[in-house]
Image (cartoon, rainbow, N blue to C red):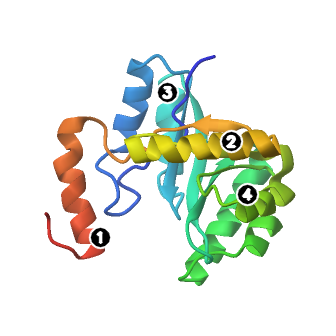
Amino acid sequence: MTYAALHNHSHYSLLDSTMSVEQIVDAARRHGMTAVALTDRDTLAGAVEFYKRARGAGLHPVIGSEVTLASGGAVLLLVENPAGYGNLCRLISTRVAHESGVTLDDVARYSTGLLCLTSNAGETHLLDLREVFGARLALEVSPHTNEDTQRARAAARLARRHRIPLAATADAHYRAPEDRPRYDILTAMRTLTLLG
């Protein structure tokens, strides 16, 4: 099975990524991927540019967004078809109108044509999302650190218990280790904290 990077943030996720759409597409092509996703936080601002660049590079573009939930956290929503694209646009418009995020009822209202990845391994949250998405739900794991690996193992046990598939992602905000200092500066600006 070929890996596809399904959780990538570009500079359209304001102050949350050092990558351009062009860099995301180029990295996917160089690594031999056949598909790549753009999943900026609460926006589809880069979707058209991404679609054109990915198609031009011979890649299958997966359009999505990491949508903030009013209850805390976020869900990663990926477009499955044209109806899903329209629903994701509606959901993001709803998000813009509600500073704290969208509700699970909002997500359910606009869930047709969308796939959902969630990294929130809370059992109640997971079962609520399964009620909305059914077989279109996967539990996302992004093990970068030892702590993440422990969370991923717990998520795998939960997923197995409820027969929900796992999806390994990178949750990419920068392209290479040498880009981390730039990302740290953006994070400090976004969170209004000092670099430490």
**Can residue 149 be seen by looking at this rendering?**
yes
Q: Hey, what amino acid is under mark 3?
A: Gly
* Cα–Cα gap, marks 4 and 3: 37 Å
Q: Secondary structure at mark 2?
A: helix
Is 193 placed above or below 97 here? above
Q: Quadrant of residue 124?
A: bottom right
User: Marks 2 and 4: CB-CB under 8 Å?
Assistant: no
Q: Which residue is mark 2?
A: 157
| Label annotation for residue 190 | 1
Residue 142 place in picture, x, y as percent: 49, 42
Q: Which residue is mark 4?
A: 126
Question: What residue is rendered at 59% in x and 76% in y?
Answer: 101
Q: Hey, what amino acid is under mark 4?
A: Leu
Marked residue nearer the N-terminal end (2 or 1): 2
- In front: label 1 or label 3: 1
* Cα–Cα gap, marks 1 and 4: 29 Å
* Cα–Cα gap, marks 1 and 3: 33 Å
Q: Secondary structure at mark 1?
A: helix
Marked residue nearer the N-terminal end (3 or 2): 3
Q: Secondary structure at mark 3?
A: helix
Is 39 placed above or below 105 here? above
Q: Quadrant of residue 34?
A: top right
Q: Hey, what amino acid is under mark 2?
A: Arg
User: Marks 1 and 3: CB-CB under 8 Å?
Assistant: no
- In front: label 2 or label 4: 2
Q: Residues within 10 Å of mark 3 (few under 14, many from 20)?
A: few
For the residue pair 113 and 101, the one nearer the viewer reads as: 101
